[in-house]
Amino acid sequence: MKKVLECIHDGLIVSCQALEDEPLHSPFIMGRMALAAKEGGAKGIRANSTIDILEIKKQVDLPVIGIIKQVYGGNEVYITPTMSEVDSLAKTGVEIIATDATNRLRPDGKTLKQFYNEIRETYPDILLMADVSTVEEAIYAEKLGFDIVAPTLYGYTAETMGKKIYQDDYALLKEIVTCVKHSKVIAEGNVLTPEIACSILNMGVHAVVVGGAITRPQQITKRFVEALRNN
């Protein structure tokens, strides 16, 4: 586990994801996207779904942060929400499993503590990453024993809706880095430019995840179009 964390230290992790309603939705494309990311110097990949992860692992030998986005009815927890998704991810050989680590109950009624303990007991050798939305959640995730903490869900929960990681001079990220002493802090969410990534890395995070700014051309195109319209 230590070797994986050393591998991604001070590096760029590229999130290669495309949902079913997106133009690039395809394990073949995500595999090639991961290969392109590696050729560009990425130190790791974050990916969604077992089919994409298996293809990515055929193409690159980088550490993979695996998730499965699965919605259960009206429950708001959808990033690796139950042991069913964890079991599926473990079979792919991912080095890191990320899960929603907010304070919300999971679809099966389990608390985060119950869920964490079950994962650790079943898969003691897999690194666990906590996707959180607040400083308090980050502190609690570290207390439970998560290896990695990331503000992935900042801006996506009722409490933080619409906020972006670089707003308020990165106040949230700075506080997480200050408060979390043992878990590795990885920055993720709305990292749109190399300049933002550098600023964040200089705050003392372990690594930076960039997704849409690299791997979602429809979002990149939209930013260009909006800039031209407002020119």
Image: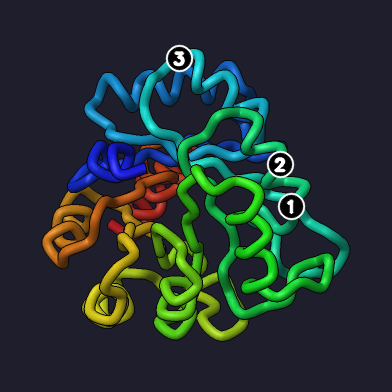
Q: Is residue 158 above or below residue 192?
A: below
- What quarter of the picture does the N terminus occupy? top left
Say which element carries label 3: helix
Residue 115, picture quadrant: bottom right
Task: Point out residue 35 in the picture as x, y percentages from the top left corner.
Answer: 39, 19
* Label drawn at residue 59: 3
Q: Residues within 10 Å of mark 1 (few under 14, many from 20)?
A: some
The residue tagged with tag 1: helix, strand or loop?
A: helix
Q: Residue at x 27, y 19 (%)?
A: 39
Quadrant in the picture for residue 53 = top right
Select label 2 or label 3 by which is in front: 2
Badge 2 marks a residue whose secondary structure is: helix
Type of the residue with mark 2: Asp
The answer to whether 26 appears left or right of 182 in the picture is right
- Look at label 1 and name its amino acid: Met
Q: Mark 1 highlights which residue?
A: 83
Q: Residue at the location (40% across, 63% down)? A: 150
In the foreground, 15 or 149: 149
Residue at which label 2 appears? 87
- Could you tell me if the residues under marks 2 and 3 are in contact, i.e. CB atoms within 8 Å? no
